[in-house]
Image (spheres, coloured by chain):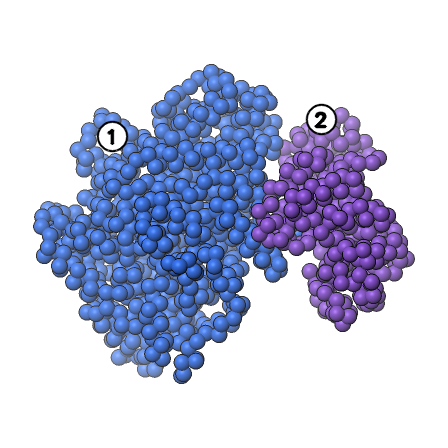
Chain colours: A blue, B purple
Amino acid sequence: MTAADNIVNISDYAPKTEDLYLSDTVKYLKEVKDSFHDRKEIPVRDRVYERVLAENPDDLQAVRFAKAFAEFLKVKKIHIDPHDLLAGFTYRYTYNTTMPIDCPDDFDPLYRPPISLDSEREYKTILEYHGLSEDSTEAKELRIFLEGVDAWLYKHWFSGHILPGYDRLVEIGFSGLVELGRKSVAEHEGVNKEFARSMLITNEAAVMYIGRYAELAEKMAAETDDPLQKKNLSRIAESSRWLMHGAPRNFFDAVQCLWYGQEIMMAENVPASESLGRMDKYMYPFYEKDVREGKLTYNEASELIDALWIKFSGNLHSYQAVTVSGTNEDGSCFENDLTYMLMQSSRKMMFDQPLMDLRYNDRMSKRLWNETVALIKTGTGFPGIFYDPICIRAKESTGQSPEDARNYAIIGCVETGLPGHEYTPTELVHLNWPKLFELMFNHGHATMQDFYAPLFDDKDLDSIKTFDEFYAWYKSEMEQYTALAMRSIELVETMIPWRFPTPYLSSLMVGCYEKGMDVTGGPCRYNNTGVSTCGLATAVDSLAAIKKVVFEDKLVRLSEFTNILNNNFAGYEDIHNIVLHHCPKFGNDNDEVDFFMSDLIAAFAGVVNSRKNPRGGHYMMGLYSVEDHAKAGMKTGATPDGRLAGSFESNSMASVQGMDVNGPTALVNSVVKTDLNACTNGMVLDLKFNPGFMENPRHVEALHQLIDTYFHTGGMEIQISVVDRQTLLNAQKEPEKYYNLVVRVSGFSAYFRSLNKTTQDEIIARTEYHGI
Amino acid sequence: MEQLHLVSNIQRFSVDDGPGIRTTVFFKGCNLRCAWCHNPECIIAEPTLQFTERSCVSCGRCEQICPAGVHHITEDGKHLIDRSKCIGCGKCAYNCYQSALDLNGKAYAPDELFAEIRKDRHYFESSGGGVTFSGGEPMLQRDYLNTMLKMCREAGYTTCVDTAGNVPFEWYREAMPWTTLFLYDIKLFDSARHEQATGVPNGRILENLRLLTDNGADVFIRTPVIPGWNDDLEEFRKIASFLAELPGREHVKLIQLLPYHAYGVGKYNMIGQRSKTEDVKPPTGEFMQQALQFYLDLGLPAQIS
């Protein structure tokens, strides 16, 4: 092997997927990976935690959790397939002991775990922690908030949604963390010492856990007669032994260490957006050194990345985001061999994990763009494309230094964070905008469930004489329900380090050992909180409909809308026809209705930016809705735009599904009328194209120009779904035949089979652009 | 009946009607009757009622609302339409809950149309695109067209006119100063066959192309390839020779051979007509390559599009 063999053949054109290197080992692993799961393992975690927590009632909660975690790592099942290139596998577990959630202890690991929030437990825990009585104003608001979560006025989640400092982990290894931990315990006193101890316990447990893998690999290597298996297992064993005491020496060590880091992360945290950061940046030094020394080729490295992708795939639907490319200090585009290799693995594997995100730089090479197109063409919805100048500007607007802002990576769907240095629970709250109409037309009562939230300004509907008055009312209720949620999540946030801490995650975040604090308590360089939205265009179109039929055409009185909506338009088919088909809709480049969007978002941003969070950080506005526009829609009554009760709402910043009839440029123009610089927690714009469109190079060029113009006129994120309607309809009918079909949902992709029917219907209903 | 200025459709993000990202404005009215036309609603100059039968639930609302007695729902639920009575008021379409009815054709004042076109100016700039006037035959509304072309050129957009060539050359001479590019159809070389397929002979069409290029107008030549109508190689050989011998040959910037597609077939049913190419399959790739080769052999800039 000469140095020349190591250099990839560089051409502007992306290689065809079938021409990419795929080893027999990887092909085999891809076939068998789903058989590794074990349903008997699901309850193990919570059982161990329950026992250990009961045995240690007096410790600081973080120490109790750490002890339980350590015990769990001792007994949990571990797995190496004899053919595998890397050790490890993530079994599915429940997390009911460490989160106020409820998940049954048996479910199909190849589908999403059926997790629901236990808001009663959360409510009681918060009251107990803060010493609040049920009669206090705070408790009353908290009850409205948490009941609102159950009724889907709000979506609320903590845990996960982070960028652990994996860059530091591969640099110093677990042994390096243990060293930091010992130093921290020695340096701190009191409760800080206890927090340091909790983290150190988890790191020492991680080392022992890696030792279990070393032992297993040694045993398997000794037992096998297959030379290739022996070689691979011995490499795992040798590397794992080393990683118990030393930092990664080479690319293999780094990949294995990264996976251990992630596998152990899932032992502590619900698999929910534990994201990988800029993998092509922090893994590159290992790759470059090995290649330079003639110890590694591109294909050998890509085989390991393929094997790593198979590891990620064990946690279906878990939003593990990998970020590639970016911007260098001089403004040039960051890219290297790994940028390509990671995207190519996604093309070869076609899994829903990891989520692949590309930072788009105006100076990106033609080759990188073509690689991006090749990935888009797979139809998996990867990569999410983020425009660097606006994303960096948004980070800077929250007080980050230019250097830190430039180093952002993607969390989960579309949120941005500084890996290892920023703890921003991005999913603490979403406000379901369309639900507000239900409350406003019914004096604060929901119609699809027993939920009452007193309106801030309850009005006699017929006293409202102008649309402006109605619009101002909607805006004011929206602002105040947002503010209420923010007051409530402050009670949540301040409780978390003391009731639901995450010591292992903390050990990976810079600042926690240094200050002797749990990551959730605010020790990081940046400590922000996400406040986001859901159902934007559904709400905006509803306002446009009311404006036209009530105040302009005077077809019905405002108060009649109560009946119309509560009867789901039954008996009002003429009004339904008019609001559905003859009122202006967001997404068509219509200034009047697009103004509602930009104006309401500015108002929302005003509330979000009006205060600091309890950890001294910023609240950050998000304009994305994960899959909640379907879930919230199922719990939300009919809306004035003609949407029927229980059906999906609009997705993130998109138009209502199928209502954007003027093509993608019109939709994009509608979107960029909103100032997205204020969108510090991310946004989603999904465009769906027929696969035939992508077959014509001229069309692909036009798509590039479309994306470019979108970014240059104020766009932040865009993603391209390439799937035709008929395929989706077939997949809905015969899921077993489309078992591996991965589609873009919102800020993430998922197996179509694993989505609920409302979400499936929502994706099918989106406008599909053709090239005719 | 001069100058109704009816627009059938404004299609933004058009990527197949000239260079870059374009907004294509489809005018109604045409003086050809091509058997394979994929925009049959644009042949008709008047407002055209479009009916999507599979969306209709035979509720009968249109029958009650129509002032002219166009609609009738039979006892067994069949929706009959007598288009000869239609006055184009659009009331049935507005009141159809299923959107099974639509009235195609909307009048735009030049300022209104320009405001629509202008919306995508950023895309025109980034892609070298602009506006394309198509149809139908946009040249039939030449005063309106010239007004629009002038407005668009003055705003800096590139302008394409998608034309079948069957109008007096003087009309082109008027449009030329404001037209960046003509998308010019040559459908058949043999005039008798041309007349059979399109309703008109092609002498004027070929002559206009000669004059256009001779007068310095840039053109893209577009030839649809329709099995059963023009798919013999001799035709393509002759068209290629004709183009190669044009005095202004250098103004032929691109030749696009467009394989037949069936996207237009369903539209005939919607306007109460039957497509003549229902059973036509797209030409084979092999045939397309053979046809293309004639052009390439003569050094012409041709491609299959």
Above or below, comparing residue A139 to residue A295 in the picture: above
Q: Which residue is mark 2?
A: B65
Q: Type of residue at label 2? A: Ile
Give the image location of residue B48, x and y in percent: 75, 37
Going by the picture, which residue comes out furthest to the bottom?
Answer: A1
**Which residue is painted at 36% across and 66% down in the image?**
A308
Q: Secondary structure at mark 1?
A: helix
Count of picture labels: 2
Residue A740 left/right relative to B206: left
Q: Which residue is the site of mark 1?
A: A139
Circle nearer the viewer, 2 or 1: 1
Between the residue at mark 2 and the residue at mark 1, the CA separation in whole angstroms equals: 57 Å
The answer to which of A352 and A459 lies nearer the viewer is A459
| Circle 1: residue type | Ala
Q: Residue pushed farthest right?
A: B192
Write down the quadrant of residue A661 in the picture: top right
Q: Same subunit under labels 2 and 1?
A: no
